Amino acid sequence: MVYQKPLVVGKIRTMIFGAGGMLGTELCAVFQDAVKFKRSDVDITDKKKVIESIVKTKPDVVINAAAYTAVDDCEDNRELAFDVNGIAPGHIAEGCKLAGAKLVHYSTDYVFDGSMKEYRETDHPNPINAYGRSKLLGENNIVAKMDDYRIIRTSWLFGVHGKNFVDTMLGLSARMETVKVVNDQFGKPTYASDLARKTAEIAGFAPGIYHITNEGVCSWYEFASAIIGNAAPCTSEEFIRKAKRPKYSVLVNTKTTPMRHWKDALAEYLNKRKIMV
Ligand SMILES: NC(=O)c1ccc[n+]([C@@H]2O[C@H](COP(=O)([O-])OP(=O)(O)OC[C@H]3O[C@@H](n4cnc5c(N)ncnc54)[C@H](OP(=O)(O)O)[C@@H]3O)[C@@H](O)[C@H]2O)c1
């Protein structure tokens, strides 16, 4: 049984690292009373400051949405990637243990190598790029340092408050006749706002690893075609990136109720974006 006890947002003391990011901003909207830390407040690689901030805040739950997420740049800046995504989550876990707080942390579909068509929470990670390796180190450091963690692996995030695939496609579509998009990498797009709301539920669940995405599998090309009218399919060989990407990074959620289909979430996001422009 996964369910532990209901967590009533507003009745618990929550603190958020990475409050200025795409997911972090959505988390701030869900956990309105949380104590919020952006990078300018606490750099999560600063162990002393991280531990001090947690102990001083005395939270029931710490949510870490801070990460170095530029997948290709991680290949060039491995040390930074491993510091932020790999070692720093261990500092946060130490702080949580000292303060007696639960930790909710986010990881990625890119901890898997893509050789299987889909991945359950218990499947063996085997990352094929520096970002994935750094995120897996983060997971392992948390598990080694504390018991009361929830690690949420998610994928292909889009949302209002950050650089993301949907906005990139809209920008390219306006400038180019056709936009070539790879049609041989498959995953599950996920709306940051949906994930933030689901996080409140997961925080009340038993410790462990969770696979949380919107429902529905697609290729990047299929995702692009739902956003713009001038996408054209291509292969990964035609679109070489610095970091290797898994062919399949489809996360299967075996532990909790599914979220809505990504197409419904995308429709809401595109509407919201129209209102904002
Ligand atoms: N985006 C995706 O497609 C995706 C897919 C799977 C999993 N995830 C995971 O989901 C989580 C949230 O991702 P996201 O897309 O919301 O990322 P994001 O928009 O890049 O936000 C990450 C935040 O972390 C901050 N940060 C970076 N280094 C830091 C440091 N040393 N100390 C403190 N803060 C630091 C960034 O600050 P600056 O803006 O100042 O750099 C940014 O505000 C991450 O764990 C990520 O690995 C994301």
Image: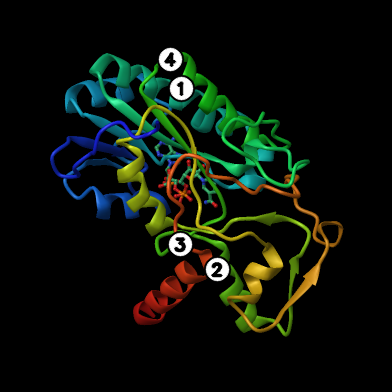
Q: Out of 211 and 55, give the one closest to the viewer.
A: 211
Q: Position of residue 164 (x, y in %)?
A: 53, 61
Work out how far the residue at label 4 is from the one at label 2, CA to CA, in angstroms.
Answer: 37 Å
Amino acid at the residue labelled 2: Val
Mark 3 to mark 1 CA distance (whole Å): 29 Å
Q: Is residue 215 left or right of residue 147?
A: right
Mark 4 vs 3, N-terminal side: 4
Amino acid at dot 3: Arg
Nearest the viewer among 1 and 20 is: 1
Which mark sits nearer the N-terminus, 3 or 2?
2
**C-alpha distance separating marks 4 and 3:** 34 Å
Quadrant of residue 8 within the rendered picture: top left
SS at circle 1: helix
Secondary element under disc 4, as helix, strand or loop, is helix
| Marker disc for residue 260 | 3
Is 183 on the left or on the right of 143, as rendered?
A: right
Looking at the image, do the residues carrying marks 1 and 4 touch, with CB atoms under 8 Å apart?
Answer: yes
* Mark drawn on residue 145: 4
The kind of residue tagged 1 is: Ile
* Quadrant position of the N terminus in the picture: top left
Quick one: label 1, few (<14), some, or many (20+) residues within 10 Å? Answer: many
Q: Residue at x 60, y 38 (%)?
A: 120
Query: What amino acid is found at the position of numbered circle 4 in the picture?
Result: Lys
Residue matched to label 2: 166
Q: Name the residue under label 1.
A: 142
Question: Gap in Å between the C-alphas at discs 3 and 2?
Answer: 18 Å
Please say if 234 is above or below 83. Answer: below
- For mark 4, does the 10 Å Cα neighbourhood hold few (<14), some (14 to 19), or many (20 or more) residues? some
Looking at marks 4 and 2 on the same chain, the residue that comes earlier in the sequence is marked by 4
